[in-house]
Amino acid sequence: MTSEEYDKLLNRAFEKMPKLSAESSDFKVPPVDIIIQGTKTIIRNLSMLADRSRRSEADITRYLSKELAVPASAEEHRLIINGKFNADDLNKRIQRYFETYVICKECHKPDSHLEASGRGMFQFVCEACGARYGIKSY
Ligand SMILES: [Zn+2]
């Protein structure tokens, strides 16, 4: 067998392997698209983050404002943060937002919503597997 043939065989074997939990691994948290204007940091793709998480722009704004401990507001689908922040820092926090508040810890799918449950808690409700659990609100 030539090495070319061997490669072909290998490729075919890989193609046949079942993809593990394709839906969850295909889900990517979108990276933030930011610009700094003066003393403010502006996330230009707020509507995309809201779409992917199925949370409102106001929800994401409130979360980041609390995380960063600075005022933030949503204006014309842009998230305006008081202060200068770099993309790495913001991406980590958005990643954590998705991991905690969007992606189900049982089935790892993003089809979920939050219900207020009082005392500083949300009830996380997974629409894919039906899991429900309490998480700290923001
Ligand atoms: Zn689930």
Image: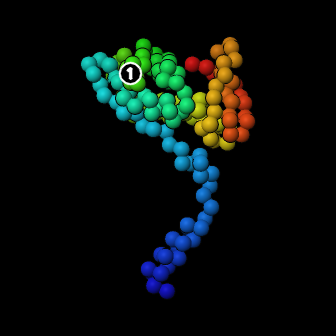
Q: Secondary structure at mark 1?
A: loop
> Percent position (x, y) of residue 99?
57, 35
Left or right: 38, with 1 as reference point: left
Q: Is residue 87 visible?
A: no
Q: Residue furthest front?
A: 76
* Quarter assignment of residue 131: top right
Q: Which residue is mark 1?
A: 76
> Percent position (x, y) of residue 57?
48, 23
Q: Residues within 10 Å of mark 1 (few under 14, many from 20)?
A: few
Q: Is mark 1 within 8 Å of ligand 1?
A: no
Q: Which one is in front, 90 or 75?
A: 75
Q: Is residue 47 visible?
A: yes
> Percent position (x, y) of residue 47?
44, 29
Left or right: 131, with 46 as reference point: right
> Percent position (x, y) of residue 135?
65, 25
Residue depicted at 52% across the width and 21% down the height = 59
* Quarter assignment of residue 44: top left
Residue type, label 1: Glu
